[in-house]
Image (cartoon, rainbow, N blue to C red):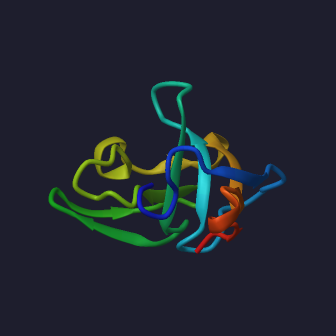
């Protein structure tokens, strides 16, 4: 998620998510096909359409399209496709360390 989130950043998470957050929100998820925790940004929400090189993808009512900020090297929905809501762990909303970068995530 560089440059928005850097190694060593400490984040506050909201684990009470019951539905997909707004576009642009940073979320913690368990990557499909593994239990690896990852940070990604919500790029498209349930019901949206996403254009890919393979064609148009329609997101179901419980799916979202997630992208990393480093588009040239991120492993994200472009590789594993739509992500179901049950893979969502939390919403990242605030960086509290390092102090010079503290504040709400954008």
Q: Residue at x 46, y 72 (%)?
A: 48
Q: Residue at x 61, y 55 (%)?
A: 27
Q: Is residue 44 above or below residue 15?
A: below
Q: Is residue 106 left or right of residue 95?
A: left
Q: Position of residue 12 (x, y in %)?
A: 76, 54
Foreground residue among 47 and 4: 4
Q: Quadrant of residue 69?
A: bottom left
Q: Residue at x 41, y 57 (%)?
A: 2
The single residue placed furthest to the top in the displayed view is 34
Q: Position of residue 6 (x, y in %)?
A: 50, 52
| Count of numbered labels shown in the rendering | 0
Foreground residue among 10 and 19: 10
Q: Position of residue 41 (x, y in %)?
A: 50, 61
- In the rendered image, which quarter contains the N terminus? bottom left
- In the rendered image, which quarter contains the C terminus? bottom right
The single residue placed furthest to the left in the displayed view is 53
């Amino acid at each position: 998620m560089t440059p928005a989130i850097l190694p060593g950043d400490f984040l506050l998470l909201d684990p009470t998510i019951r539905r997909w957050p707004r576009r642009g929100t940073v979320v913690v998820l368990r990557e499909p096909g593994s239990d690896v925790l990852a940070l990604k940004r919500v790029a498209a929400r349930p019901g949206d359409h996403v254009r890919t090189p393979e064609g148009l993808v329609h997101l179901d009512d419980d799916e979202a399209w997630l992208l990393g900020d480093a588009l040239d090297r991120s492993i994200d929905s472009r590789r594993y496709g739509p992500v179901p809501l049950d893979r969502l762990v939390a919403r990242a909303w605030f960086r509290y360390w390092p102090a010079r970068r503290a504040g709400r995530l954008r």
